[in-house]
Image: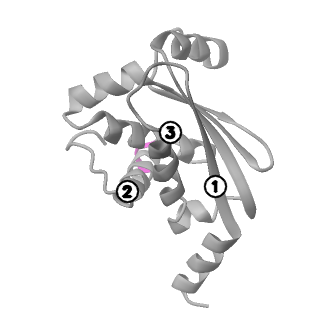
């Protein structure tokens, strides 16, 4: 079987469903992060880590206050962050919590749109749920490479210096 044939087989056997909850006012359609992640899992590296059949994740767009509380309660870090991932089990890959205010601030800081930043944070969280991390320089390079490749599938290009 060719690599292309393998990719087609994996894509047919695996389906990602994404539930999006907006706990804060955010001018973004739930279909946006959903479509970014659905395209992302067509990358062979990501597809290979998904369970066969249908799997799902939930994304919660929320406030800095809630992200700070979650970060404190689950990671022991009393500060706001941009995205947190919570592993699931079986066909539930897990949950992502994303601070919408932090998304907007980081987009402004780096000079790209809030949608680009939201796509980046969504992909970043998905990578964590699939087992990637960025503790070492080599892991950071690989995570960045996969993030950029996944974003490219949705025609999203983060500003230079973001990754």
Mark sitting earlier along the chain (2/1): 1
State whether residue 156 is above or below residue 52: above
**In this view of the protein, can residue 17 be seen by the observer?**
yes
State whether residue 56 is above or below residue 25: below
Horizontal relation, residue 139 to residue 101: left or right: right
Front residue of 40 and 49:
40
Front residue of 28 and 116:
28
State whether residue 1 is above or below residue 138: below
Q: Which mark is residue 16?
A: 1
| Camera-side mark, 3 or 2 | 3
Residue depicted at 38% across the width and 53% down the height: 151
Q: Residues within 10 Å of mark 2 (few under 14, many from 20)?
A: some
Residue under numbered circle 2:
154
> Mark 2: which secondary structure?
loop
The magenta region covers 134-138
Q: Reply yes or no: does residue 145 show up in magenta.
A: no
Q: Residue 2, percent across and down?
A: 56, 89
Between the C-alphas of marks 1 and 3, the distance is 15 Å
Q: Residue 117, percent across and down?
A: 34, 37
Residue depicted at 71% across the width and 53% down the height: 55
* Extreme-right residue of the structure: 90
> Mark 3: which secondary structure?
loop
> Which SS does the magenta portion mostly show?
loop
Mark sitting earlier along the chain (1/3): 1
Residue depicted at 38% across the width and 21% down the height: 102
Q: Residue 124, percent across and down?
A: 47, 42
Which of the image's four quarters has the N terminus? bottom right
Q: Residues within 10 Å of mark 3 (few under 14, many from 20)?
A: some
Between the C-alphas of marks 3 and 2, the distance is 15 Å
Residue under numbered circle 3:
30
Between the C-alphas of marks 2 and 1, the distance is 16 Å
Residue depicted at 74% across the width and 39% down the height: 88
């Amino acid at each position: 079987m060719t690599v292309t044939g393998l990719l087609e087989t994996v894509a047919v056997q695996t389906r990602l469903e994404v539930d999006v909850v907006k706990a804060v006012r955010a001018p973004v359609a739930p279909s946006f992060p959903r479509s970014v992640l659905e395209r992302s899992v067509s990358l062979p590296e990501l597809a290979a880590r998904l369970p066969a059949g249908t799997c799902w994740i939930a994304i919660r767009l929320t406030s800095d206050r809630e992200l700070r509380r979650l970060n404190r309660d689950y990671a022991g870090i009393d500060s706001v962050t941009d995205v947190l991932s919570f592993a699931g089990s079986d066909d539930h890959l897990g949950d992502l919590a994303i601070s919408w205010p932090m998304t907007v601030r980081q987009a402004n800081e780096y000079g790209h749109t809030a949608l680009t930043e939201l796509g980046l944070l969504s992909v970043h969280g998905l990578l964590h749920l699939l087992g990637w991390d960025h503790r070492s320089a080599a892991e950071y390079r690989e995570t960045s490479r996969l993030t950029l490749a996944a974003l490219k599938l949705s025609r999203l290009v983060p500003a230079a210096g973001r990754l």
